[in-house]
Image (cartoon, helix red, strand yellow):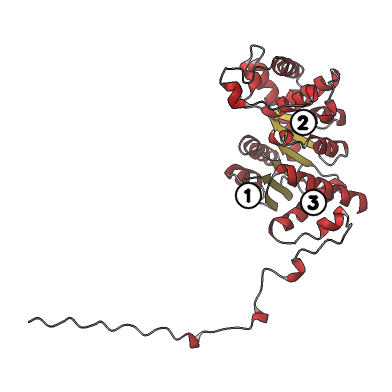
């Protein structure tokens, strides 16, 4: 009869009594009570509320962003706003216009969809159609006034060499559209600051119409890119760039503008770059935050809804500028 196999000898457990330990008082801790939120007293001001936010994670980034905008404003440094059209559709136009009028924002860049929603808000005080519903019968994007007036403005912008953004802002002002106080492009036109439009041909509803002129769209958008590159070349040190809701086009455009500026000898470094969005996408994280600030500067990623974040930042900046 075969012998039963021997039970293997199991290793002795580690002797945890031999661990090298230290006093908790000697350890560096990343979270301390002086960074905690503080209770807002009854009737407290907005500034009191903002100052009582935690100095941790996104709330700390929010404090740093507000301070960077305030210091850029006081130091006459650029604050560029790269805006996805979603910012207009969630009701932020009055705040963006106010920032332009108060010279907090010194330059605006949007994609082609930006002029559509900006124009429609100026024209009739409302925008944004039900895409699935309109797509069913092919009526999606077929608004006559939106296409014809914007395409006419683009052709004028190409012909005169002023770009899309300036041409659209001028058109809205010249026609005295009823709700033009909501127009970011009209506000930029009045303030004399650059407002540029960076088009992906075929991506916007106005490209569906016979009034669209491909040569004019391309030329005027290229002219705007050259203007945008100049604005970016002036960013550092001390400027601020805000990417609010553009996941692909504007981060790509910004990266190329940074390269142009540096190639021409401009010190495009030492600025604050912030990305505000509901999701932190690849291109903004790389092309707005990481790569452009690798030579110096600060990168801030704050995740949240634009309709909450932007009013918070707007109010905090206004308070700081008023009271010092």
What x and y, as percent, mark residue 272?
Answer: 73, 49
Instruction: From the viewer's side, name the closer residue of 131 and 27.
Output: 131
Residue displayed at 57% across by 44% down: 282
Residue displayed at 12% across by 83% down: 3
Q: Nearer the viewer, mark 3 or mark 2?
A: 3
Residue displayed at 49% across by 88% down: 17
Find disc 1 in the rendering and name its residue.
290
Say which label, 1 or 2, has the lower sequence index: 2
In terms of secondary structure, where does tag 1 sit? helix
- Mark sitting on residue 195: 2
Give the answer, above or below, for where 166 lies relative to 47: above
Give the answer, above or below, for where 129 lies relative to 304: above
Say which label, 1 or 3, has the lower sequence index: 3
Q: Are marks 1 and 3 in contact (CB under 8 Å)?
A: no
Q: Are marks 1 and 2 in contact (CB under 8 Å)?
A: no
* Residue 198 visible in the current orientation: no
Q: CA distance from mark 3 to mark 2?
A: 22 Å
Give the answer, above or below, for where 182 lies relative to 178: below
Say which label, 3 or 2, has the lower sequence index: 3
Q: CA distance from mark 1 to mark 3?
A: 20 Å
What x and y, as percent, mark residue 53?
Answer: 77, 59
What x and y, as percent, mark residue 177?
Answer: 83, 21
In terms of secondary structure, where does tag 3 sit? helix
Structural crowding at the residue carrying mark 1, measured as other residues with C-alpha within 10 Å and reported as few (<14), some (14–19) or many (≥20): some
Find disc 3 in the rendering and name its residue.
66
Residue displayed at 87% across by 52% down: 320
């Amino acid at each position: 009869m075969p012998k039963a196999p021997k039970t293997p000898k199991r290793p002795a457990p580690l002797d945890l009594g031999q661990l090298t330990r230290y006093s908790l008082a000697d350890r560096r801790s990343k979270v301390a009570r002086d960074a905690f939120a503080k209770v807002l007293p009854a009737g407290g001001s907005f500034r009191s509320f903002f100052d009582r936010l935690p100095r941790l994670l996104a709330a700390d980034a929010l404090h740093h962003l507000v301070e960077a905008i305030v210091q850029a404003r006081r130091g006459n440094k650029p604050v560029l706003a790269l805006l996805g059209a979603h910012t207009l559709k969630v009701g932020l136009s009055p705040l963006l216009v106010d920032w332009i009028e108060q010279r907090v924002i010194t330059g605006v860049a949007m994609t082609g969809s930006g002029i559509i929603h900006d124009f429609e808000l100026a024209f009739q005080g409302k925008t944004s159609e039900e895409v699935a519903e309109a797509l069913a019968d092919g009526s999606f994007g077929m608004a006559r006034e939106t296409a014809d007036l914007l395409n006419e403005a683009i052709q004028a912008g190409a012909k005169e060499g002023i770009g899309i953004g300036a041409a659209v802002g001028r058109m809205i002002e010249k026609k005295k559209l009823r709700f033009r106080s909501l127009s970011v492009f009209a506000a930029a036109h009045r303030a004399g600051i650059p407002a540029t439009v960076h088009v992906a041909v075929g991506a916007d509803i106005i490209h569906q119409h016979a009034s669209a002129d491909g040569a004019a769209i391309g030329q005027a958008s290229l002219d705007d890119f050259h203007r945008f590159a100049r604005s970016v070349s002036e960013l550092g040190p001390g400027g601020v760039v805000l990417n609010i809701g553009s996941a692909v086009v504007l981060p790509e455009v910004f990266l190329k503008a940074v390269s142009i500026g540096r190639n021409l000898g401009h010190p495009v470094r030492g600025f604050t770059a912030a990305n505000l969005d509901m999701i932190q996408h690849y291109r903004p994280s790389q092309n707005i935050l990481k790569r452009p600030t690798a030579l110096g500067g600060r990168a801030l990623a704050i995740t949240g809804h634009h309709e909450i974040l932007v009013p918070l930042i707007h109010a905090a900046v206004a308070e700081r500028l008023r009271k010092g």
